[in-house]
Image (cartoon, helix red, strand yellow):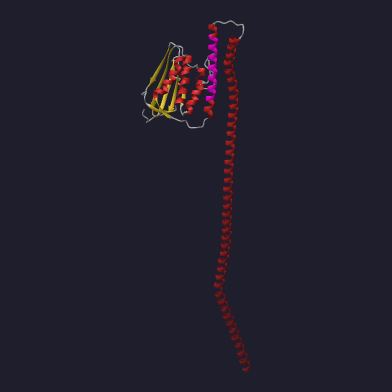
Amino acid sequence: MRKKTKGTGQHLARIVMTIILLLAMTTSCQHNGARAADSSPVISELKTQNELLQQRSRFTTGSVVMIFGIVALLAFLAVNSRWTRRLELKNRQLQRERNVVVAQNKQLAIERDRAEAASKAKTSFIQSMTHEIRTPLNAISGFAQVLTMPGVNITEAERNDCCQRIQDNTRMLTNIVDDLIFISDIESSSEKVVTEPCMAAILIEQPLDMVKPLVAENVKLNNECNIPMEQMIETNTFLVHTILNKLLDNAAKFTTEGSITLCMSLENEQLHFSVADTGPGIPEDKKDYIFERFTKLDSFAQGAGLGLAIARMTAEHLGGSLTLDTAYHEGTKIDLFLPAKESSFIN
């Protein structure tokens, strides 16, 4: 009985020990499970923080790369803009230099053309003057030989005719020389034209008196002054007379019948003269250059063809103009316009 009781106690002890061990193991498992459960949020938080750190790292790296790229782009644009401005400035400078060279070349071409034209004009001038001077010289020499040739019997009338021809050709030669000197003086003069007050009557009466001996008998010489003859006008009397003398001489040379009319008026400080004749007029093919030197309407007429050229040069020297009235068909009409002022001087 004791042995059975002793065996049963031992068996219960083993069962209790087993239960205790099981409880211990369960408690341990529960504790470990609780610890595992307690540690799971920490790991999750660490993972979240790690991911945030990684995202921030990636964002920071991308931002740095972007900023560096922007800075590099701005630097490139700045350098490119600077070089572009330099190139533009250089191109502008080159363009200006090119324009200067082109302008200089054009000016050189103009000067070359002027020099060539001047050379041709000089050659033509010398040839024309040689012909114009030789003609009266040959006439003077020929008639002088007739008068002085021994053994030649001539009548008094023939002698007088020879003398008259010598005088006429001498006068022609003198006029040519005077015209050449006058042209030279006008072309080389750079001084301002000197003006003075004079009466309107003086401006037109003297040229009319000078041309009267040259006018044909059946040609009427008219004077149409549309301002008071005592009116004082500020101008250069000598140069005005020079122009009018040339115009009236030319009219008298070609007008054999009809009339020659000199008109004068003053409007808005501009002096207007006109010389109109009833001669043959100017041929159409010569109207464009009748004021050029050595232009002669009739190759057999006396003179060197300098009269109208001198008249225009003098008019321009006075600041005026000389033109052909192409609307006038009864002969030839030339208009002269000169700047002038009514003088306050009272005689």
When the figure is inspected, residue 337 is found, relative to residue 105, above or below; the finding is: above
Horizontal and vertical percent position of residue 30: 56, 78
Q: Position of residue 183 (x, y in %)?
A: 53, 25
Q: Position of residue 175 (x, y in %)?
A: 53, 19
| Residue at figure coordinates x 39%, y 24% from the top left | 200
Q: Residue at x 60, y 86 (%)?
A: 17
Q: Between residue 286 and residue 123, name the one nearer to us.
A: 123
Which residues make up the magenta segment?
160-182
Q: In the image, is residue 64 part of the stretch drawn in magenta? A: no
- Residue 74 visible? The answer is yes
x and y percentages locating residue 40 in the rendered image: 56, 72
Q: Nearer the viewer, residue 305 or 344?
A: 344
At horizontal 63% and vertical 93% (from top left) the residue drawn is 3
Q: In front: 155, or 193?
A: 155
Residue 229 relative to residue 20: left or right:
left
Task: Give the prevailing secondary structure in the magenta stretch.
Answer: helix
